[in-house]
Image (cartoon, grey):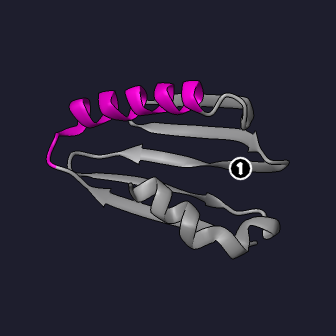
């Protein structure tokens, strides 16, 4: 199965980076509520296992917040392979 993986370096430290990620996720859920459904996420320490549906595609993955790096990765539905680059760039942005 195809996959995606994005890593972004930061200088915030782990607690501040996690807080920023949580704030960002709340904003995404609010701003894209019409495009995203069946959202589920579970934090275990510094790792967020997540899943949601968008445009008929089930997306899932793992987001890990480290001291100087945030990584997001997971399987990618075959139908989304053609837009993998765009997905990865959106995560980086």
- Magenta-colored stretch includes residue 6: no
Considering depth in this image, is 87 or 14 the residue closer to the camera?
87
Location of residue 72 in the rendering, given as x and y in whole percent from the top left corner: 48, 54
Magenta: main secondary structure: helix
Residue found 49% across the figure and 25% down from its top: 26
Q: Quadrant of residue 78?
A: bottom right
The N terminus lies in quadrant: bottom right
Tell me if residue 31 comes above or below residue 90 in the rendering.
above
Q: Is residue 45 visible?
A: no
The reply, left or right, for residue 12 in relation to residue 64 is: left
State which region is magenta.
Answer: 11-31
The C terminus lies in quadrant: bottom left
Location of residue 13 in the rendering, given as x and y in whole percent from the top left corner: 17, 39
Q: Quadrant of residue 45?
A: top left
Tell me if residue 63 comes above or below residue 2 in the rendering.
above
Q: Is residue 33 visible?
A: yes
Residue found 46% across the figure and 64% down from its top: 89
Tell me if residue 1 comes above or below residue 6 in the rendering.
below
Q: Which residue is mark 1?
A: 59
The secondary structure type at the circle numbered 1 is strand
The reply, left or right, for residue 65 in relation to residue 80 is: left
Residue found 51% across the figure and 64% down from its top: 88
Location of residue 92 in the rendering, given as x and y in whole percent from the top left corner: 40, 58
The total number of labels drawn is: 1
- Magenta-colored stretch includes residue 20: yes
Location of residue 52 in the rendering, given as x and y in whole percent from the top left corner: 71, 39
Tell me if residue 33 comes above or below residue 70 in the rendering.
above
Residue found 51% across the figure and 37% down from its top: 48
């Amino acid at each position: 199965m195809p996959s995606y993986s994005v890593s972004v370096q930061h200088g915030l430290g782990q607690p501040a980076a996690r807080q920023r990620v949580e704030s960002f996720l709340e904003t995404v859920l609010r701003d894209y509520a019409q495009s995203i459904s069946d959202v589920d996420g579970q934090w275990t320490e510094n790792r967020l296992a997540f899943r949601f549906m968008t445009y008929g595609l089930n997306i899932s993955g793992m987001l890990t917040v480290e001291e100087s790096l945030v990584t997001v990765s997971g399987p990618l539905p075959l139908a989304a392979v053609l837009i993998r680059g765009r997905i990865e760039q959106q995560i980086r942005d």
